[in-house]
Amino acid sequence: MTLTPLIEPGWLSAILPEVILCVAGMLLMLLAAFAPKLREETAPLALIGFIIAAWSERLVVGGRFFGGTYEISGITRIFDITFLLAAMLATLFAREYLQRENIEGGEFYALLMWGTVGMMMMAKGLDLLIVILGLELLSICIFVLVGYHRRIPVSNEASLKYFLMGAFATGFILYGTALFYGATQSTNFAEMGRVFATANPRDPLLSIAFVLLMSGLGFKLAVAPFHGWAPDVYQGAPSPVAGWLSVAPKAATLIAVIRLFAAMTPLLQHAMWMKMIAALSILSMVIGNAVAIAQRDLKRMLAYSGIAHVGYMLIALLTLRDDSVAAIAIYTITYALMNIGAFGVVSMLAKNQNDPQTLDDIAGLGFRRPFYGLALTVCMFSLSGLPPTAGFIAKFYIFKTAVDSGHVTIALIGILTSIVSVYYYLRVVYFLYMKEPPEREAVPVGGIFATGALAISIIGIFLIGIFPTPLFEMAGAAARALLP
Amino acid sequence: MGAGVSNILSWMVWLPIVVAMILAFFPRHAVTAIKSAGLAASLVTFGLSFVVLQLFQDGIANFQLSESHTWIPQWGIRYALGVDGISIWLVMLTTLLTPVVFLSSWNAIHKHPKEYVIAFLIMEAAMIGVFVATDILVFYIFFELTLLPMYLVIGVWGGANRIYAAIKFFLFTISGSLLMLLGIIYLGFLQYHEVGRPDFSITHLYGLSIPMPAQAILFAAFALAFAIKVPLFPLHTWLPDAHVEAPTGGSIILAGVMLKMGTYGFLRFCLPLFPDATARYANLMIVLAVIGVIYGALVSWVQPDMKKLVAYSSVSHLGFCVLGIFALNQTAIEGSILQMVNHGLSTGALFLLVGVLYERRHTRMLADYGGLAATMPLYATLFVITVLASVGLPGLNGFVGEFLILAGSFKTHPTATIAATAGVILAAIYLLWLVQRVFFGPVTREENRSVPEIAWNEVAAMVPLIALMVWIGVYPNTFLRKMSPSVQKLLTTVQKGGQRGQVMVAETLTRRFAAPSPASGRGTLVSGPRPAQREGR
């Protein structure tokens, strides 16, 4: 093995966003510890940190760094923006939530930042080990963030559940990686790809490795049948965290899976693996949408709907083309806007956070708090994929790539399950506008931060829904560069 | 044509939306201002539609006043609008009925008037968009956009059982339209392979020749969406619930315009895009339509509830429209389009009048009325005229539409036509009986002696409807003249595309009946399958 110089010129500017976020996180921790007077201002400062990181994306030069293990390209930029967007929305919603619950602290935002760094590593890693490193960094942040509301039992329970299940899943991922290493003598995607090109598709070692790896990643994606943790964890986690958790880690895992699949392309045509992915997708769409109907707890409902949404995204993975990668990139951005927006409205419901936040809590909200009602309605319609929202564009793109690649049956299943999903998304609108408010109502309280975040969500949803062309151009170019 | 009028269709679509967005920022208590702004916006849109009518040139079959802008080039989607003879009167109907709704519900809506006005304005824009879109995805987007406001209108301002009705309405429609979306995607895929670039323009898609099994599946996907919307028997079950529970304004728009989005969809998409499948399944559609005509009429007959009676009569009347469409000849299709407008006018007016009575007495049961002609003479007059128009009295609009449909479809489907004619007779029975029980006979309830007469705003809403009923009844040529070339072109498209299918169907028939008769070239344009023969066997 030849040792290549690991530090190429320009490496610092390549990882500038990561560096900024790491340093900003540390500063926030120190501020919270040594300047308690500034504690009130941690959220705005964190926001500034995220904005600087997003701005620094412009300075980043594309290319491969650190001995060919770290790639910065168009697609990583899009995903970085998605992660930063998710984190910013979560920060905006968290500010007033944490103040209301009296648990504000600098470490919350620091953890969000470091989690974002972990996701960026997952998106950019060209080596399975880098991906796993990023994943672990992310997971540790999630463990703490989920249990951040430490005085209430459900939050602790959620954290413990995620920790135990997550550790187990990481074990699967590591085991799968080890087997892949055994089969290919490398953990580098490019090296692995070279071996895959000539490998026997029926090699049991490869199949076992693939199944193990996908089980672990499936856990992170919350696809059925690895979804059991999601409803409990979302329910217990502080709502802004749940919104972030339901979007950003999934996006990071998806881009890692895309890279893995791109390396495996020659094999995927022959092996049964794509059938497994199809099965995961169908199972997720069916279970997610069917069980969501039975949920009265908003966060559990959104958890199951999230399972279904990953199912839709997996459809695009069945045939890896530039179109399908672009479709997934657009879907994740859209999903970040609409799902975090929906969780954001839930986070504003002022009630004991240990109790479930049910549909009854939003009854009659649409006329008492028109803006929040409108925001939740827009998010719900976007989630159900109705035009002219971004959800329609995203879903249309997914189904279009499916039909173009000949997966008409699975697209049909997707459409049929979408019809089911309309029912429970619509039920939210029904409670918002057509139900009388309960006696002890949980009036949502939100200041400028949360309202601003909702405005960003609504504007984003309509902007992508009505003028998707710039995003298409960006995602299309990035995807073509990713898949030679 | 100047730049100012070249995008007049866009103006019509976007004006109501822009006004709705401005209204969202109005203070909640400025009720009169909000209502006036809504009415003014709808009247201006109505005025714009007259400009469209002026600019519309007779004798041209293609889309006119077209505008086309690149929208999503990656998918070949263009923001393309245009009107032709098939859509022009439906656009006019939409722009007419929206101010009628605002006028008639001027004093009827006490709960959240601001949201009510906004919902109707967005609905109007979406409905106009449906009729003027010439890109299939733009059509789809507007088609879906009509759902949300209507869902809210039924669910927020509706009657006692409104939630059930609203959700049923939404789920029925969305099931059909989502499957149609998959059909659209597949159509785009086929078009991409044919021309080498993505293209969703309707006129370009007309040139696509699709092999038969795929065509049948696509036809099914589209026809299902439109059949739910029309609604065609047996997919009509959402309609009585939605109509009865909706507030008066919602019923007017629902019956007046939204149902036509289904019949319009048949004409715009199913027939010209899938001619072979149309030829093959025309008989099935006609059978369903005739069942709908008779079933709707029979159920209307036994309704104790006035609004439900009118709702079921819609099933019956829309059955005529579908019969006319799938008879596939010039007379019947023209009659069918005219009947869509007629139904919008007369059933819209009926819902309005039933709503007027409900406002005053808070009951819709026929048994609670009787002898109202004495207390409300003006109201009774308007009601009787409307009923007669709906029944099909010569000299009023219903007669012209139904006569054209029946005359046209008799040439190709005599048996079905004769069966459908029973629907006309039944309509006379249930509608006249309705009039008799409500307006004549002795006054059985004391409350009916002091019902206030119909108010100025309601009369104002009724006047244009009545005027048009008479106009269409006396001189339908004003209306038919504009639609003829487009209908002719549609039938040519169907015939041209259907030639291969015609052969295929003829072959199946040959195999099935062993005694083929050579096409006699009688009047009908799609005479290949000789449906008359099949009908008669």
Image: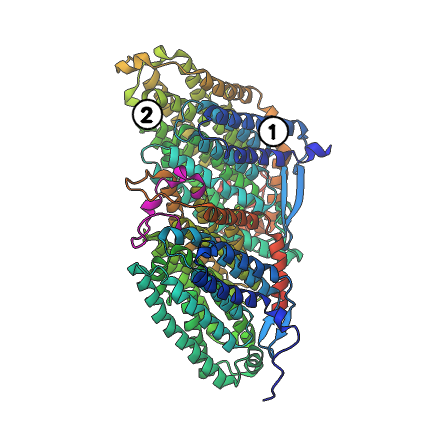
- List the residue tagged with mark 2: B364
- Amino acid under label 1? Ser
Q: Position of residue B165 (x, y in %)?
A: 36, 38
State whether residue A455 appears in this view.
yes
Can you tell which mark lies on residue B134? none
Q: What scheme was used to colour the molecule? A: rainbow
Up the image or down, A335 lies above or below B163; here it is below
Q: Please, which chain is the residue tagged with disc 2 on?
A: B
Closer to the camera, A421 or A354? A354
- List the residue tagged with mark 1: B49
Residue B350: say if magenta. no
State whether residue A206 appears in this view.
no
Q: Picture quarter containing residue B28?
A: top left
Q: Position of residue B362 (x, y in %)?
A: 32, 23
Q: Position of residue B206 (x, y in %)?
A: 62, 47
- Highlighted magenta segment, given as a residue range: A347-372
Which residue is painted at 40% across and 24% down in the image? B108
Mark 2 falls on what kind of element? loop
Q: Picture quarter containing residue B267?
A: top right
Up the image or down, A93 lies above or below B311; here it is below
Residue A351: say if magenta. yes
Quadrant placement of the C terminus of chain A? bottom right
Q: Is residue B204 left or right of residue A282?
A: right
- Amino acid under label 2? Arg
